[in-house]
Image (spheres, grey):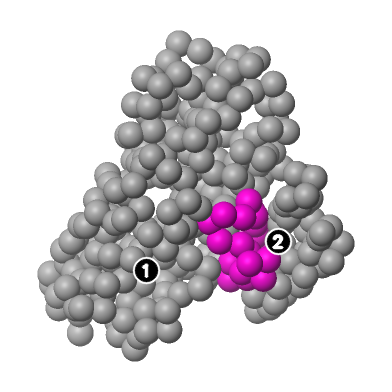
Amino acid sequence: MVQKIRIGSRESKLAVTQAEIVKEMIEKAYPDAEVSIVTMKTTGDKILNRSLDQIGGKGLFVKELDQALREGTIDLSVHSLKDMPMELPEDLPLLAFTKREDPRDALILKKDIDEVPSGGVIGTSSKRRMIQLKTLYPECKFHGIRGNVQTRMRKLEEEGFDATVLAAAGLRRLGMGTIIGKIFSIEEMIPAAGQGILAVQRRAGEYEELRDILNDPDSEIMAKAERAFVRTLDGGCTSPIAAFAQIEGEKVRLKGLYYRESDEQYFVEEYCEKKELAKEAGEILAKRMKEQYGE
């Protein structure tokens, strides 16, 4: 019987909002449970003047929360799945994948403009977004921009940017959908693996009773396919790899993006497989694309 649960979260407004989503799901199933949120600043939140690949990759967003789980100061942690490393420690497996929010990327424009001007400056520190934006906005310049949603909105107005790109899911969860200038279709911009899905992490063997409450089976299938694709291509934070899966009846359809460093070209392919073979679908598509388009 669940009695007391401490949920670990990053300090940002979005991270806390996402932890509250999980908290409410647990409280609904266990009205008598005492559920609280414990916030902490991660290394990735502290260092904002360099890109993630320069300071150690996505693991910097989970390091402190992993440590808190191991020390027992929190019982669960909640992350945006897209921010989690592809390789996870065996003692801290994922318990659940929540129902997916809008997985697409959103363009946010500076106040008083309704489109990106020719030669304008788009702020993004994501190589995945940048290579796809260069196709959509070939005349634009691209400069790095990091920080939580509120920090990026401030930088957009103060630091000479005309636009920036954020995950639509985060903006919608924050009730900020009205600031979206344009939603990119999946054909225009393939999202990061897991974008729009929240991951709930635990200590191995604990809180199994919460899995059915928190886990969305379709999200788990999509996550398996997308993360297997990226993992097979050795894609961490530094590689501009993208993957997006959809459930079609009893099958999963995966769209993958592979980037070739030598000539700065990227390629997009699809693969369809039975839902129960989602992980294998990701691996197969990745190997095919590596063989066909690799160096």
Residue 113 placement, left or right of 189: left
- Does label 1 or label 2 sit earlier along the sequence? 1
Mark 2: which secondary structure?
Answer: strand
Residue 200 marker:
1
Q: Point out the stretch of residues depicted in magenta.
A: 224-248
Residue 101 picture location, percent across and down: 47, 51
Quarter-of-image position of residue 72: bottom left
Residue 20 picture location, percent across and down: 26, 56
Q: Is residue 75 above or below residue 17?
A: below
Residue lying at the far top in this picture: please name it.
Answer: 112
| Residue 174 in sight here | yes
Quarter-of-image position of residue 231: bottom right
* Nearer the observer, 185 or 294: 294
Amino acid under label 1?
A: Val
Residue 64 picture location, percent across and down: 28, 65
Residue lying at the far bottom in this picture: please name it.
Answer: 205
Q: Is the residue marked by circle 2 packed among few (<14), some (14-19), or many (20+) residues within 10 Å?
A: many
Q: Total number of numbered labels?
A: 2
Q: Is residue 68 above or below residue 141?
A: below
- At 63% across and 16% down in the image, what residue appears? 119
Mark 1: which secondary structure?
Answer: strand
Location of mark 2 (residue): 254
| Residue 225 in sight here | no
